[in-house]
């Protein structure tokens, strides 16, 4: 089973400041990832500069295979010194995960990461070492499906200080909240957003410190195979449908002609789901053995527009129309294989049809780029 490391990130800036003094950088590579969360000295612009430099330097150097000693030395030599406090100070939490789930954690002056396994807050076996005068806490572990790793900045731990909680929310309360909330949601971004919303309430809507959370959940990788349009050569119909059926994950068919082709090869019928029709969105179809069947270019155009608008999978979860269903399926998938048939649809040559129908290939290209910008792996093939 292929693992996927889903991440969610949210932050609150200190009340009255233009920028958040915390920063997070994340890169994915060959199925693994490196994430660094940093909290700069103070708040506002100066803190943002310190934390951004720290997180970007650390991610870049670790991505190039450099050791933590080199990272810490470079960060210390690069950060600008605060003229008032005479310090160049920024905390960090580093998470480095290989595709097989082997994980390395390093923490400096940030609240301890929360590790949740089987729904239970679990203590990590940490060791300490001194680098450039800093005490670094390190841990090695093997992640498995269902695990959570969650890092919060001290703004979360201190939320409510002097108000609802005299001494702040505290790490213990934060950890137990995350333990309970992780059991209630299967979405890392939802957990991150909810955590920051709670912190904002504890601060009375005026955060007294920058507050940041990075939530990471381990789950099985989600894949989708999308077939758009018939092959240019009808002799390839059987092979393409066989690829679709053998593909991993959700099986999606876009286009009326494509749906009829797939149904024919399966010996099935296409049923029209009239309840799925919406203004400007044609109804979907139903083919036994296929997860999702939609109309073609009009629906794809709607998907492109939704993605451009920044819509999330969570916002689409209750949508019943073709655009919502297709966009949601694409956003849920981590890897998408899109098979684009090159056959010309005679309907698209009708001058009375919307001009956008002539741009199927461009629309698919844009959809692929928008999905890749969200961290998806997209492979487009033409047949």
Image: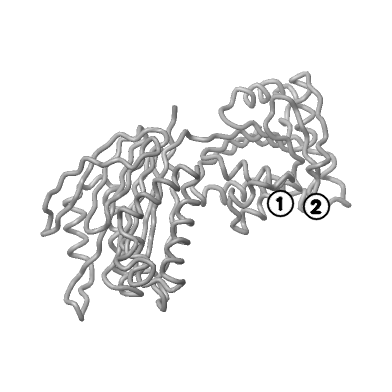
Judge whether 135 appears above or below 254 on screen: below
Mark 1 sits on what residue?
302
Residue 84: percent from left, percent from top: 20, 81
Of marks 1 and 2, which one's residue comes earlier in the chain? 2
Q: For this view, does 290 lie left or right of residue 91? A: right
Side of 77 relative to 180 (left or right)? left
At 13% across and 54% down in the image, what residue appears?
131
Farthest-out residue, top: 267
Task: Please report contact status of discs 1 and 2: CB closer than 8 Å, yes or no.
Answer: yes
Residue 320 at x, y percent in the picture = 73, 44
Where disc 1 sits, the SS reads helix
* Residue ID at (87%, 47%): 350
State the colouring used for the structure image: one colour
Label 1: how many Cα within 10 Å (few below 14, some 14–19, many 20+)? some
Q: State the mark number for residue 280.
A: 2
Q: Residue at left 28%, top 73%?
A: 42
Q: Is residue 264 left or right of residue 24?
A: right
Instruction: Give the quadrant of the C terminus.
Output: top right
Q: Position of residue 90 (x, y in %)?
A: 25, 64
Residue 341 visible in the snapshot = no
């Amino acid at each position: 089973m292929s693992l996927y490391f889903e991440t969610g990130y949210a932050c609150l800036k200190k009340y009255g400041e233009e920028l958040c003094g915390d920063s997070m950088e994340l890169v994915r590579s060959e199925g693994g990832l490196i994430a660094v969360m940093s909290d700069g000295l103070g708040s506002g612009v100066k803190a943002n500069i310190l934390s951004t430099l720290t997180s970007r330097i650390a991610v870049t150097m670790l991505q190039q295979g450099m050791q933590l000693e080199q990272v810490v030395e470079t960060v210390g030599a690069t950060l600008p010194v605060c003229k008032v406090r005479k310090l160049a100070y920024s905390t960090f939490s580093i998470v480095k995960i290989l595709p097989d789930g082997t994980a390395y954690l390093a923490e400096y002056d940030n609240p301890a990461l929360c590790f949740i396994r089987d729904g239970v807050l679990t203590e990590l076996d940490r060791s300490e070492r001194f680098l450039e005068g800093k005490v670094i806490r390190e841990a090695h572990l093997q992640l498995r499906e269902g695990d959570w790793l969650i890092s919060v900045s001290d703004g979360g731990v201190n939320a409510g200080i002097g108000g609802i909680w005299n001494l702040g929310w505290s790490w213990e309360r934060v950890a137990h909240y995350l333990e309970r909330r992780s059991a209630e949601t299967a979405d890392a971004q939802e957990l991150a957003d909810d955590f920051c919303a709670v912190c904002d309430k504890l601060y009375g809507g005026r955060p007294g410190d920058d507050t940041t959370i990075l939530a990471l959940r381990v789950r099985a990788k989600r894949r989708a195979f999308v077939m758009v349009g018939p092959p240019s050569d009808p002799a390839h119909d059987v092979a393409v449908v066989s690829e679709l059926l053998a593909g991993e994950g959700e099986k999606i068919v876009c286009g009326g002609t494509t749906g009829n082709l797939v149904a024919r090869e399966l010996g099935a019928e296409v049923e029209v789901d009239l309840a799925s029709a919406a203004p400007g969105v044609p109804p979907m179809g139903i083919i036994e053995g296929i997860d999702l069947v939609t109309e073609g270019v009009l629906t794809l155009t709607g998907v492109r527009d939704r993605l451009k608008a920044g819509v999330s999978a969570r916002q689409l979860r209750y949508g019943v129309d073709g655009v919502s269903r297709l966009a949601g399926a694409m956003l849920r998938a981590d890897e998408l294989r899109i098979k684009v048939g090159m056959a010309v649809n005679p309907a698209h040559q009708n001058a009375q049809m919307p001009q956008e129908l002539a741009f199927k290939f461009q629309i698919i290209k844009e959809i692929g780029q928008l999905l890749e910008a969200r961290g998806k792996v997209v492979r487009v093939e033409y047949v």
